[in-house]
Image: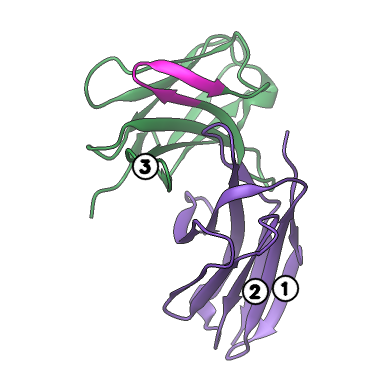
Chain colours: A purple, B green
Amino acid sequence: GQQLNQSPQSMFIQEGEDVSMNCTSSSIFNTWLWYKQDPGEGPVLLIALYKAGELTSNGRLTAQFGITRKDSFLNISASIPSDVGIYFCAGRPNTGNQFYFGTGTSLTVIP
Amino acid sequence: EPEVTQTPSHQVTQMGQEVILRCVPISNHLYFYWYRQILGQKVEFLVSFYNNEISEKSEIFDDQFSVERPDGSNFTLKIRSTKLEDSAMYFCASAGAAQETQYFGPGTRLLVL
């Protein structure tokens, strides 16, 4: 199956700092989604991207669909304690309905 | 805001028993999915369902698994004879006609003893 690699695997940052994480795939995707998952809960959709180069914001979150269509980036500005959680990217290739999930980035925000 | 719901939230079962996990997708959605997440690992696709049939499935979704939409609202995942390694969180998701985004339910935590 498709492999999506997320980096970094984990981050420990001070409250107020900005965060950047990315997701890369071995093949071209035509949709990228970013989710946040709190412990014991389902992933919550943060941002959806549909076109190469697209830059979309949702409050303090900004995500970009990479030009090569093999990567995507998520930035969080001015982090707060409730940003703590695991962030997953998910991508869908040109064929099929299936979304493939990345390995996740665990974010810890230190007050 | 409409949301995907799942029941039960937790299920404990003995190895070899059958379990049925239930999901109520968002009401106007047409595409339905089941995913699995083993503790501490990434979310893994199991199956997608559209127009009353399976449209895609992964290698995880073997003969022990089946899905059904028995009425206009519920979407179920059945595991016929559970194994220890089936212990995981199971998430249902649904998507609208454009299939462009999937919304997840809160999950069912399955523990097989």
Between the residue at mark 3 and the residue at mark 1, the CA separation in whole angstroms equals: 34 Å
Mark positioned earlier in the residue sequence (2 or 1):
1
Relative image position of residue A28 (x, y in whole percent):
68, 48
- Check whether the beta carbons of the residues at disc 2 and disc 1 lie within 8 A of each other: yes
Q: Nearer the viewer, mark 3 or mark 1?
A: 3
Give the chain letter at badge 3: B
Name the mark on residue A48: none
Q: Type of residue at label 1?
A: Met
Between the residue at mark 3 and the residue at mark 2, the CA separation in whole angstroms equals: 35 Å
Give the extent of the magenta segment: B48-56
Name the mark on residue A108: 2
Q: Secondary structure at mark 3?
A: loop
Q: Quadrant of residue B106?
A: top left
Nearer to me, B42 or B50: B50
Looking at the image, which residue is at 40% across and 31% down? B32
Using residue A9 as the reference point, say whether residue B30 is left or right of it.
left
Task: Report the predominant secondary structure element of the magenta stretch.
Answer: strand
- Check whether the beta carbons of the residues at disc 3 and disc 1 lie within 8 A of each other: no
Name the mark on residue A11: 1
Q: Nearer the viewer, mark 3 or mark 2?
A: 3
Q: Type of residue at label 3?
A: Ala
Relative image position of residue B64 (x, y in whole percent):
59, 10
Give the chain letter at badge 1: A
Name the mark on residue B98: 3
Looking at the image, which residue is at 29% across and 25% down? B74
- Check whether the beta carbons of the residues at disc 3 and disc 2 lie within 8 A of each other: no
Which corner quadrant holds the C terminus of chain A?
bottom right
